[in-house]
Amino acid sequence: MSATTTSIPDPKKVGMVSLGCPKALVDSERILTRLRADGYAMSPDYAGADVVLVNTCGFLDSAKEESLQAIGEAIAENGRVIVTGCMGDEADAIRAAHPQVLAVTGAHQYEQVVEAVHEYAPPSQGPYVDLIPQPDLADIKLTPRHYSYLKISEGCNHSCAFCIIPTLRGKLASRRIDAVLREAEKLVAAGTKELLVISQDTSAYGVDTRHDAREWKGREVRAHMTDLARELGQLRTDQGAPPWVRLHYVYPYPHVDQVIPLMAEGLLTPYLDIPFQHAAPSVLKRMKRPANEAKVLERLKSWRDICPDIAVRSSFVVGFPGETEADFEYLLDWLEEAQLDRVGAFRFEPVEGAAANALPDPVPEAVKEERYARIMEATARISAAKLQAKIGRTLPVIIDEVGEPDEDGDIGATGRSQADAPEIDGNVFLRNVSASLVPGDIVDVQVEDADEHDLFGVPSGNI
Ligand code: SF4
């Protein structure tokens, strides 16, 4: 008697090109998680994909240009392309440059992107398809397993003159605190050693929901940055240690002071990412920045008194319309006082639709360039001095990558100290590490050398 066999069709494959900020990366992860639950597989390359999603960034003109190029490359390599993300709000511009795109959806339109994938690459059908066990239905992560972005809200209630995020992403919409904490707990249980809390304005978390309180582990917790920080500090990895927890996009509202003691206790990573953007009061006023108050320098000092190792990262815009030489020098003097650990600087660039474009007194390009060079020089000098002061100390370092043994059998590794967020800050380059070291391990490192941005060292057991 011959048995009849029914072949199970291969699942349709989706490729993903994810551009832009960590918030966009989280969106890409959510879309892919949904698609996998619908029976799709992921393709690591263009050739194997039935359809390619390009998650775009539309913030600056340069980012739009990069998005259009990425769409062009995906069309040339694969041909079947669906566009989503921030630039999806400019469907006309995308279609004008690339009429072949199959569909265009905007930021956070998860349903529409998933529908478009179903339309242009219908999921494989077969008598057994729905019964095939999914190998791992955990959420898809595009970051390495040992660190994860934790998005707590969408959108923003401010109206900074140079920014179109509130237009692109809408008003502040905070997630429920119990949902955020559940996600964090799941990520840590799955091997995350470092959580990166992101939003457009982390200090404003819960303002839109009146800090809605929920029950969590028998306690009442509010959707509020301080409650969130305290609860994240209670999590433990499988080694029984608190995961590293970094707060990004924190505006210096008064309640930020309350999280500094948690950093001093080791329950929160001593790191704050505060996008100051400028220091001169007249420029901040024209920028319409939130939490624009004069006492920031005093508060930085008091934070360092409580937690001497706190690292503060920030970004600044030079050449904003109306910025005078005196304003710029005010900023440079402020930076000398503030002694920030990590600084990113940008030349002001008009963004289509931003209120700043209508401001008088644009700064000439040559002046912008000159100010940019001066701020880069000043901040690199401050960073180098701060890193030099770490030589000889022993610091915890999280490992991102372990190399192959060289001809002498020495293995090197790349990691980060608590002062370094992934992708945006510096690295710690290690020599002579153990062959058993793996990404995500946290080791004590003796710092041997430093340059402007990075540290060099050796695990303290191997000196
Ligand atoms: S705080 Fe200002 S810069 Fe940040 S997203 Fe809101 S409007 Fe944009």
Image (tube, helix red, strand yellow):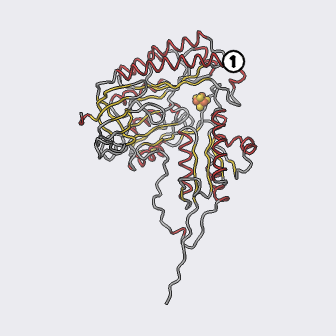
Please, is residue 383 above or below residue 104 in the view? above
Query: What residue is shown with label 1?
Result: 362
Disc 1, SS: loop
Rendered-image quadrant of the C terminus: top left
Question: Could you say where residue 92 lies in the image, as x and y percent from the top left?
Answer: 75, 42
Residue closer to the observer: 437 or 26: 437
Instruction: Kindly identify the residue that appears in the image at 29 percent across and 47 percent down.
Output: 436
Instruction: Kindly identify the residue that appears in the image at 45 percent across and 26 percent down.
Output: 256
Residue closer to the observer: 460 or 72: 72
Please, is residue 63 above or below residue 8 in the view? above
Q: Residues within 10 Å of mark 1 (few under 14, many from 20)?
A: some
390 with respect to 154 (left or right) = left
Tell which residue pokes out farthest to the top in this image. 326
Q: How many marks?
A: 1
Instruction: Kindly identify the residue that appears in the image at 50 percent across and 84 percent down.
Output: 3
Question: Could you say where residue 127 lies in the image, as x and y percent from the top left?
Answer: 57, 73
Please, is residue 192 above or below residue 201 in the view? below
Residue closer to the observer: 360 or 411: 411
Q: Quadrant of residue 309?
A: top left
Question: Could you say where residue 28 lies in the image, as x and y percent from the top left?
Answer: 56, 47
Instruction: Kindly identify the residue that appears in the image at 48 percent across and 46 percent down.
Output: 179
435 with respect to 157 (left or right) = left
Please, is residue 301 above or below residue 70 in the view? above
